[in-house]
Each structure stands twice: as C-alpha cells, then as structure tokens.
Amino acid sequence: MSRKLRANFLKNWFAVEATPIFVVVGAVILGGSWYLTRLARGPTIVWTKDNPTPWNEIQPNEGTKMLTVNQHFDKSWERKKL
C-alpha cells in the first residue's frame, strides 16, 4: 500500500508539467533575497553602534549614489564596516 502511495506522490511531485512552476518560484525567491540584501547594504542602513549617524560624515564633494547624472564628484563615499 505504501509503495503505491509513494509512487503516486512521486509521479505527481516530479511531473514534467510542474518544472516551470519550480523554476519561477525559485527565481522569485532568489530575486527577493538578492533585493533584500541589496537594500540592507545601502548607505542609509546602520548595522553598528560605533557611528549611529554615518550620513553626517559625508562631505559635499562625495557622491553616495551608484549612478549620478550630470554630476562629478572628487571621490565616492564608502562604508568602513558592515
């Protein structure tokens, strides 16, 4: 009895028609986790208590954006610790 249930379960679980669903769900999970880690590493997120206001250390000649249109900065601001 258990072999019949197991065979039926495996036949439905590993069906060829379900492969696109697994691919789409896997891509959504991977993309969501990538986006959350990207947001967590942004310059406005504070992970340490050493400097609770890192935005006060940015000088006028430092750019914090990844892409700046029509602006030229002498150097780019980067975080010391994560």
Image (spheres, rainbow, N blue to C red):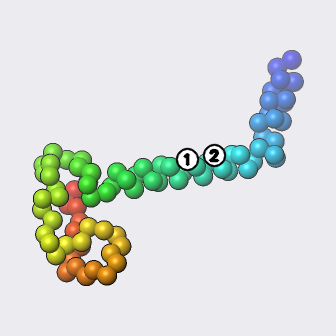
x then y, percent, for residue 59: 13, 69
Q: Which mark is residue 48?
A: none
Residue at 67% over, 50% down: 23
What residue did someone put label 1 on?
Answer: 29
User: Quick check: 33 left or right of 75?
Assistant: right
What residue did someone put label 2 on?
Answer: 25
User: Quick check: 2 left or right of 80?
Assistant: right
Look at label 1 and name its amino acid. Answer: Ile
Q: Sort mark 1 into few (<14), some (14-19) or many (20+) by Cα contacts within 10 Å.
A: few
Residue at 54% over, 51% down: 30
- For the residues labelled 1 and 2, say whether their Cβ atoms are less than 8 Å apart: yes
x then y, percent, for residue 31: 53, 53
Residue at 80% over, 27% down: 6
Disc 1 secondary structure class: helix
x then y, percent, for residue 17: 81, 46
Residue 65 sits in which quadrant?
A: bottom left
Q: Is 20 located above or below residue 2 in the figure? A: below
x then y, percent, for residue 72: 25, 82
User: Quick check: 58 left or right of 16?
Assistant: left
User: Quick check: 68 left or right of 13?
Assistant: left
From the image, which quarter does the N terminus lie in? top right
Look at label 2 and name its amino acid. Answer: Val
